[in-house]
Image: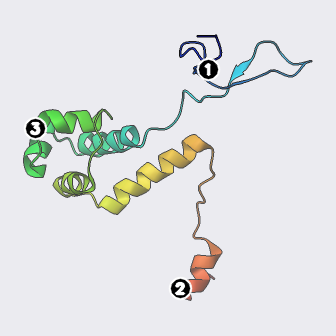
Amino acid sequence: MNNTTHPRTSRPNNRMPVRQAPAAGYGAAVDTHRQDSVLLRREIGEVLRSVRQHQGRTLREVSSQARVSLGYLSEVERGQKEASSELLASICQALDAPLSMVLREVSDRVALSEGVAIPDTVPEELIRQQGIALR
């Protein structure tokens, strides 16, 4: 068997893509794979934990009301488990926090990490659609 057909030598290179620095640049190659990518499960967990702690409630109390094991709720809050939509709705109900508000907070956090500007005002298009006059 020659080198071109041998399984060990014909494997593709499994290294991460690397962008070369410009010729007059600042040195070594730059890895284009983002290590700081946002994990949705982590953001959801942090928002849920923040709401629970702000209310001064324990994991045990919320897990009992949400009918989910304490250990699983803890893993969701730490971003180690991905909560299903049903479980997320149950946790939000136990926290007396509207799911839409939790998801809005998560969305805002993700937007900030992506560097997306979040407007402080109601968009003009929405105002026109609703027929609201601002004066």
Dot 3 crowding, Cα within 10 Å, few <14, some 14–19, many 20+:
some
**Mark 1–mark 3 distance (CA, rounded to whole Å):** 48 Å
What coloring was used for the rendering?
rainbow
Identify which residue is drawn at 42% across, 52% down.
105
Cβ–Cβ below 8 Å for labels 1 and 2? no
Mark seen at residue 54: none
Q: What type is the residue that disc 1 sits on?
A: Asn
Q: Is residue 27 visible?
A: yes
Image position of 134 (left or right of 25): left
> Residue 3 at what x, y percent from top left?
64, 11
**Mark 2–mark 3 distance (CA, rounded to whole Å):** 43 Å
Q: Residue furthest bottom?
A: 131
Cβ–Cβ below 8 Å for labels 1 and 3? no
Number of numbered discs visible in the structure rendering: 3
Towards the viewer: 13 or 129: 13
For the residue labelled by badge 2, is the local secondary structure a helix, a strand or a loop? helix
Of circles 1 and 3, the one toward us is 1
Q: Is residue 58 visible?
A: no
Dot 2 crowding, Cα within 10 Å, few <14, some 14–19, many 20+:
few
Q: What type is the residue that disc 3 sits on?
A: Arg
Residue identifier under label 2: 130
Residue identifier under label 1: 13
Residue identifier under label 3: 60
Dot 1 crowding, Cα within 10 Å, few <14, some 14–19, many 20+:
few
> Residue 31 at what x, y percent from top left?
66, 22
**Mark 1–mark 2 distance (CA, rounded to whole Å):** 55 Å
Identify which residue is drawn at 18% across, 55% down.
90
> Which badge, 2 or 3, is on the more N-terminal residue?
3
> Residue 50 at what x, y percent from top left?
32, 41
